[in-house]
Structures are given as structure tokens and as C-alpha cells.
Image (tube, rainbow, N blue to C red):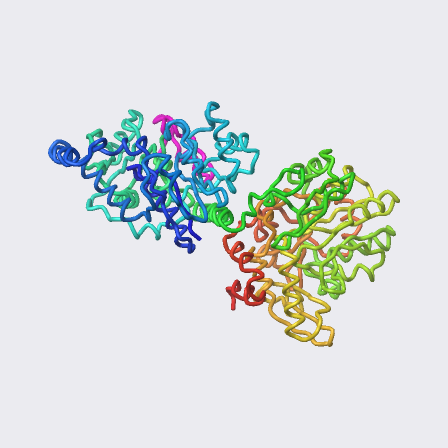
Amino acid sequence: MKAGVITFHSAHNFGASLQTWALQRVLKNNHIEAYVINYHPPIIDDLYNPLKGKEGIRKKLAELKLHYDNPRSLKRYKNYTHFINKEFNLIGDYADYQELADAPLELDAYIVGSDQVWNSEHIGGFDPAYFLDFANPEKKKISYAASIGRDYLLPIYHDRIRGSLKSFTSISVREKSAVKPVKELTNRHVDVVLDPTLLLPKEDYEAIKTVPAIKEKYIFVYMMEHNPEVIAFANRVSTATGLPIIQRRPGKLFKNEISSCYTSAPGDFLGLIENAEYVITNSFHGTVFSIIYETPFVSMLHSNTGSRTVDLLTSLDLQSHLLYSKEDFKDFWQFQIQEPEKLRKRILELREFSLAYLFDALYNNNIQTMVQCPTNISKMDCYGCRACKEICPVGAIAMVPDKEGFLYPVADEKCINCGACSRACIRKHEHIISYGKSFPKVYCAMNKEEEVRLGSSSGAIFPEAARYVIEEKKGAVVGVRYDEDMNAVSDIAYTMEEVKPFFGSKYVKSDFDGIFPKIKELLAEGRTVLYSGLPCECAGLRSYLKKNYDNLIISEILCHASPSPKVYRQYIDYLNKKHGSKVTNLQFRNKSKGWLSTDASMVIEFANGKSITVNTRKNDYYRAFTKDYISRPCCSKCGFTHKNRAGDITMGDFWGIKDIDPAMYDNKGASLLLVNNEKGEAFWNSIKDSFLFKESNIRDAFRKNHKKPNPYKTGRMEFFDRLDKEPVQELLESCNDLK
């Protein structure tokens, strides 16, 4: 694939150069043939070119005069020009928009960003180049981390911007504050992604970084505008520490100043940041690279574009480094990065999503594709909960699989635009439990019947819950079983014999078509119903029913993610073919060798009576699932994690109980139970005598269970890009890092 980036690459400042270099590097690292479109209009070039307007002999004479009158300006210009020509894979040479529009660029994708490419003050009002009007309309048009430098777009340009953005295949911005104004113009999903400089680890910058010649310790002051507050504060810090100052502007500004980096190239800037004792800056990229190199820093806001720094520091929980004025400084701890490991982890999470956005935009475009249903949400947001489909009064919505095998709602011509589906959408109305006083209550529980516990994935709460509903309440239980072809399907059981196929974890998204209306009928008849499902399915049921039923107990499963039915189906077909017999049962976590992930086994049974047993954790399919390579896209934006619960009770494995309470650990399975409301408590009180249990707390419950959605990974996109192009087993095996 050939991709061209248009940005402020010709601007002679460290941030503009380094964000261009970083985005090009990221694309190349991921096997994209990357180009920087060499569009350099006078409004950008004239800010930095000391020889502007000069050509031929006049240019040579001007250069000679500059050599004597202002050699530093000439040196700075040549250093940046050298960096641009050496480090950027430039395509074309366009000084005005018409030249660019007429150019026969043969690219597969066009990317605008990062930097303030949508800031009207920087681009002279409206420049169609930075809205990709020149790009081939049949190709992908992507904004990556485009910045508007503020939280609004000038109304005078709204119509032109709206018209240009209509043809974008994916839209993202760099600052959260830019989402609203862009979304209002486009009525499109807008993602917030990292500046390209944060997409790379510091090791990548070794290719261009230089080590400063200065040997003594110093404070680096990187000031984008002449700011008396910054100057006064830096002098104060220099006096307090005894450290001299290196700064970027051409004239001497500080009492104890030893050098200026005015003529330095971008690689020199990196070395100065890394080796500084302290950084004082009002620059966005000065802040970024202080974070990358974990150099103690404070950021004093730039007068016009401070919002981007605020958004960045807030997203990384580094607000303590922010100074609105010199009086905000209290102590030197404000310079220090207090929890570097936490910061690194947060950057990795944001980086993973940002890279996923970029490569999804280039290849799959799942993140921003809208569902074909009046809910007006993206596929990334859609849980596939079926509430919209089941509630449609005219039956206009069908659930249709995409190329990854996940079901999405598609409305047909019968749609009357009544809004019922939008009102039922659990992305818009999540139906999360509102905790009353004393809730949630947290327990570790183990079924007293060891044989029953060994037949379940964890501590076997569900079998007793089902027995109580069926035998004592004469009710029905909804769970997931395998059909005759080993597809996972939801079903309703009225006897304990019918309940048994529900036992055990099934790591695939089940088909529960038509289940919600059947549950509603049972409830209307007065039957007690125990519903067991994923949190999003539980929320979907609540949304569909529209009201609470005293005879409904909703039991949600503590979910890792929802795997692709298509991948699962191909894996089962592979097993059928390889072993010459049809798979008749699949236990993902058989506990004959133990409950822990290192001990549990996957047992696969075949129609010919044979079976195979493998370590679950090392199985190729299971490994792809746990590494989030085959999950539904929405799982990375799940709203049902930690204390955001949709069930009256929540059940899962109590991972970590071995260390938290060894008395509750025997490697045969222990359940985590969250009792979320009074109905859940009454239900638990009805069955608790069948368990050994101890009360616990939320902190211990989620010490080993994830508290937030798993990140959307680039590896996931690669997996689905390769699916159907190569044998599923080879693909799954390539994702297994434990073989």
C-alpha cells in the first residue's frame, strides 16, 4: 500500500519536523510505502525562510549577506532543510494548491495530520489541501490526529469544512476538545488519537537523536513564544538549583544562560530533552518529549494553543505538571513523574488504540463504519445485543454477519424511522445497575458438592442457581449450549437435564436470536426466569423488556471479551477434518489437572469416541482469544467493566484468591460473586447454604480480573486481514506466543 501524508512538514520547528518523521516511521515500520506530500505554501515557508522571495543571483547575494549579518539564521535554515530532504520520503514539489490538485499522485491512501492542520490561523483561513480535496475520491481519505488548536472551528468556514469532510473515510483528532466541533459538522464518529510522536518508543528516536556536547547539568527552557511568566519562573528555578539554562530563542533571555539551541536540528533537540535535569516549556511537543524521555518537567500554557497540552496531560493523569502561572508552582515534586510504570502502561494503552485506529483506517475501516440501522452508532460501538432488532415494531431489522463473522443490525425498506431501535440501543442507554446502600456485596464461593464444582469452570454457583429456579420455583433457565454442529446457541431449559449442557465456559459469541421475546412470554405467564449471559446481553434484555420483572433474575458473566463465531466455526471445521470425525463436545477448561490457567485442560471429544486433551492456556484458539485477536470490536470500548454491572448478580472466576485468601483455594475452582441489588441478595440468600463462602471486597475481586476494556490491538486487524486467506490453524498458531 502507498500512503501519502500531508502536514506542516516544511515548518522549521522541532515539533512539526518530529511529528512528520514519527508518522512516516510508524507507517514504514508496518510495511506501508510512506510518502510525505511536499506541499509547502508560502504561508508556512515564509515564516522560516530568510531567503524568501529571492531567486537566482539575488538569492546567492542574499545568502552571502546573511552569512555575515545573521549567520545563525542561515545555519538554522540549512540544518532544517537538510533534515527535511534527508529524513522525509518527499513526493512532488507544490508551492500552491492548484499545483497539488493537478498532480497525478498515485496513492492508495491520503492522510492529513498531525499538527494544527485545521487551525485557520495557521493555514490562512481555509486551505483545501489540508482537507484532502485534491485526493482521488476513490481512495481512502484519513485524518490522523488533526488539531484545530482550540475548541471551535470558525463559523465562516463551516460549510467548506463540512463539504470536504463528507468524503473522509475515517476522522480522528488529537485533542478531546476538538471532537465536539468536528462531530457537529460531520455527524460522524470522531476518535481521539495520540500525536504521532507518542506512537514510537524512545528507542526509535535513536536513529536521529544526537548527544549534546555540553557536559554540565542544565535546565532546558523550550519557549514557543516570548513569555515573561516563563522567563521569570525559569530564572527562579535556576537560582534555586544553581543550574544554568539552555533555551531555544536567538537572543539571551535568562540570568544564568549558557547556550541556545536556535540553530539545532530536530535530533539535537531530542538529546537536549533527554539529558536535561529539568524541562520548563510552553510547547506541546516540548511536553511530549519530556514525557517520552521521562525527564522532570513542567508545562506553562501557550497563550493560543494551551488546550492541546491540557488534554494531553489530563489523558495521562499528569495534571500536576501543569502551571497556569508561576504562582501555581509549590515544590519541585511537580517536576517529577511520580509513577513512571503507570505512565508507561497508560501510554501503551493509548498507543495501541491509536495504532489500531490508523491501520484500521488504512485496511479494514471497522472502527468508524456506521451500522446500517437508525441507531446511528459505529460498528466499534455496537455490542450486537439484538435489543434493536427484537424491539422493532415492523420487523425491519435483521442481524447480518460482517466479514469478521460478527452480527450487526441492518434495517430494510420496512423501516418507518420510529426511533424505537435508537431508544433501545444500549450504547446510548446502558442499563447499568444503580447501586443502593451497602451494594455491591462481594463473595468468594465454592459449591459444597465437589463433583458439581469439578464439572463447572469455577466455583459452580450457576448449577445451584439453576436447580433452585427449576426445582423450587418451577421456573426456566436461559443459558448457552452447543447445537448438533457445535455452534454456541442460547436456549431455555425447564429441567436439570436440559440445564447440564449450559455448564462450562464457551469462549465464543453465542446465537441468541428470538430468545428475548420468549423470555418476555414466560415472564408474562408468571414463570420465574433465570437469565445467564454476557453483560451486554443482560443490558440488551433489560432494554428490550423496558421494565423490571420481580420474577426475572439476571445473572451476568464476568466477561473477558466476545470472540468471533466465524473464527470458532473455522476452528471446529479444522478439527473435524484433521481428526476424521465430528467434534461432539468441547470443554475449554476441564479441571481434572487443576483450575488455574496453567493447569486447566481443553478436552475435545469426537463422534468416533476418541478425545484429545491439551493445556488450555497453550491452545492456539484460546491463546488468540486471551490476546484479544478475535474479539468483537466493541469489546475494547465495553461499558460493562469493574463496577458497571448489568446483572442482579455477577459471576466469574475469583482469580488471585490463592494469594488473597489461601483458605479458599484448593485449585478446584472458586467463584467471584457480586451481589448488585436487593433482588440479587434475596436470590443469593435462597441458595447460599449450598456453598462455602467468604465476604470479600471490590479491590480484591478485581485484583486479577480486568477493570477496564482490553485495548483494540493492531494484531487483531492483522488477524482478520489474513482470515480466509490462509488455513485457520496456521493463522491461530502464528498468534500463539507460548509454543
Hey, which quadrant is residue 261 in on the image?
Answer: top left
For the residue pair 355 and 128, the one nearer the viewer reads as 128
Residue 516 position in % (x across, y down):
78, 46
Q: Residue reaching furthest left?
A: 68
Q: Quadrant of residue 51?
A: top left
What residue span does the magenta drawing correspond to?
A: 302-331
The residue sitting at 71% across, 34% down in the picture is 419
Query: Is residue 678 something that shows in the picture?
Result: no
Q: Is residue 707 magenta?
A: no
Q: Is residue 290 visible?
A: yes
x then y, percent, for residue 482: 74, 61
Q: Is residue 151 above or below residue 560?
A: above
Left or right, residue 650 beside residue 109: right
Residue 315 inside the magenta-drawn segment: yes
Position in image of residue 190 (x %, y %): 53, 38
Q: Return the residue nearer the eye: 411 or 266.
A: 411
Residue 312: where, in percent of width, then height? 43, 37
154 to the left or right of 586: left
Farthest top residue in view:
156
* In the rendered image, the vertical position of residue 163 relative to residue 559, given as above or below: above
Instruction: Give the total number of marks visible in the rendering.
Output: 0
Q: Nearer the viewer, residue 493 or 470?
A: 493
> In which quadrant of the rendered view does residue 369 lie?
top right
